[in-house]
Amino acid sequence: MTGTSAATKATKTAEEAGAGESAGGARAARRGASRGRIDKREAILGAAFTVFAHRGYARACMEEIAEVAGVAKHTVYNHLGDKENVFRSALEAAADTVMAENLAVVERLTAEGHDTPFGPDALRATLDAVAHQLLLRCCDERSWSLRRLLYAEVARFPDLLEVVWGRGAGRLKQSLADRLARLSLAGHLRPCDPAEAAEQLLALLTGPMEARSRLGTRRVPEAELRAVGGSAVRTFLAAYGPVA
Amino acid sequence: MTGTSAATKATKTAEEAGAGESAGGARAARRGASRGRIDKREAILGAAFTVFAHRGYARACMEEIAEVAGVAKHTVYNHLGDKENVFRSALEAAADTVMAENLAVVERLTAEGHDTPFGPDALRATLDAVAHQLLLRCCDERSWSLRRLLYAEVARFPDLLEVVWGRGAGRLKQSLADRLARLSLAGHLRPCDPAEAAEQLLALLTGPMEARSRLGTRRVPEAELRAVGGSAVRTFLAAYGPVA
DNA sequence: CAACTACTGCACCAGTGAGTGCAATTGAGC
DNA sequence: GCTCAATTGCACTCACTGGTGCAGTAGTTG
């Protein structure tokens, strides 16, 4: 097996990457120990998610996770104790990452920060931009892998659904509903139930992508993405836009 | 792979089954025998789908499938040759069943068969009824299990996506688009791209159910189903309904 | 009865992978 | 130099499962 040398190499690169990220290493000596531990933990979680995403839960083996993380198999058990726990932790970490990106996008959905008066055209433009960004985020590799793993293992890990969605999709919908409520109150949208509006806008965005991206196994060209986003916004505005 | 002999045998039985179905003029005795065979085959496929749905592909074991089907393990191998093939066949069979139900529902979406003139109110009522029926079908146990299995194993069986969707979701969307095109041409909907309209209507229906049914692990009460359907139809009509 | 096919029950092999035990190593703190 | 914790490499156990072989049975056909 050539796995040994590969593993060693992986360790090195992982540590290099970690050091590069926290490059402000003034007192690296003091923090070195615990920092090294955290780096390893993060490397393990990242590797675990990669492997799980690629193979599924049952077919993913701890040895490969350790190898990809550049770590000994024992270390994985030391940090996370159990395959089940590795799975949970990896998915939670990935959900955190994905959510952070999505929330940042929704934050941009506001009537403020515009020089010109915020008319229907500006509203549509803003919605278009946010829709496109959401589509980009919702269709990237990691997001789809997370989705697929959730679907696949929700029967065996029912609690995972609450945890991951509580951090991810649930928060996204909540945040979007908040923004829509503000817009509605300001008269830019007709009076409506913001939760329902958010639910439907997200459905109009993500629903079509399921088939078009073939469950995330096909890269969707930019133009198609833009078409789906535009179409979703058009339908959304027809139902929720300001009364003409 | 040692599956050569098994595969050959499976091919043979498959050909026999196909021939038996098409050649209706066979002797009754001959038919009795093959009928028993077909019953067993169907029992196996049904059991396989149940077990796969419950455990996932990797954790499902052939022994349990045979047990649930009320059949010896050997018989499963005789009929289908391979775990992989059992999986494929079970999913295809399930997809056929689900599709048949869904298509039957969409057939009802038409302006004909009404005594009173087909006005906007009648249109909405018809859409509401179809939407509700579709929601019922899309949220039952088998449909969700199929979905989850597809999501879970699309990475390992990419061809399954084409096969199952070609028979299921793809046909549904196509059929719905056909119906919408008819309605649009008759002036009951405003001129539009029927494919896009169908895509969005389905998205508005199925999208919200993902969260509300917790990926199919929670039974959604009738009232909630009706609310989602009504809301979807309302938004759909706002975007595609006849110009007031 | 003989032949044949489908089916059954059982034992068996081989591969795989989770998790553990142990000795050796590294590196930080004293 | 010494200690302690983290880590590593290796070998190992144990359980599970896909798939096969074989002998025997039931039912049908001729």
Image (cartoon, coloured by chain):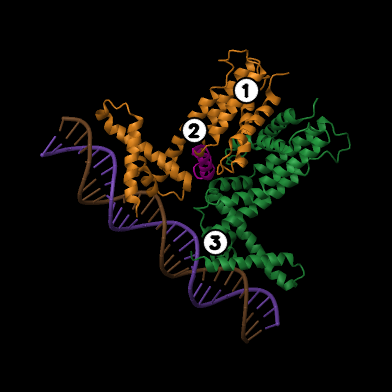
Chain colours: A orange, B green, C brown, D purple
Name the chain under label 2. Answer: A
* Region in magenta: A142-160
Which amino acid lies under the numbered mark 3 shown in the image of this protein? Answer: Asp
What residue is at 60 percent from the left and 22 percent from the top? Answer: A126
Assign a secondary structure to mark 3: loop
Residue A129 lies, in percent from the top left, at 59, 26
Mostly what secondary structure, the magenta segment? helix
Q: Nearer the viewer, residue A243 or B100?
A: A243
Q: Position of residue A142 (x, y in %)?
A: 49, 38
In the drawing, does residue A214 fall left or right of residue A32? right
Instruction: Give the alpha-carbon distance from disc 2 to disc 1, as whole Å.
Output: 24 Å
Tell whether position A134 is magenta: no
Residue for point 59% across, 52% down: B159
Instruction: Indicate the secondary structure of the residue bearing disc 1.
Output: helix
**Relative vertical location of residue B166 with respect to residue C26 in this rendering, above or below:** below
Disc 3 and disc 2 in contact, CB within 8 angstroms: no
Indicate left or right for B115 with A91 as reference. right
Using the image, tell me which numbered label, if any, was put on residue A14.
none
Q: Is residue A145 magenta?
A: yes
Residue bearing the label numbered 3: B82
Report the front residue among A89 and C27: C27
Residue on which the image places disc 1: A125
Q: Using the rendered image, report if marks 3 and 1 lie on a common chain.
A: no
* Image quarter (top left, top right, bottom left or bottom right) of the N terminus of chain A: bottom left
**Residue B71: in sight, yes or no?**
yes
Q: Nearer the viewer, mark 2 or mark 1?
A: 1
Please, which chain is the residue tagged with disc 3 on? B
The picture quadrant where one finds residue C11 is: bottom left
- Tell if the residue under mark 3 belongs to the same chain as the one under mark 2: no
Callout 2 crowding tier (Cα within 10 Å): few <14, some 14–19, many ≥20: many
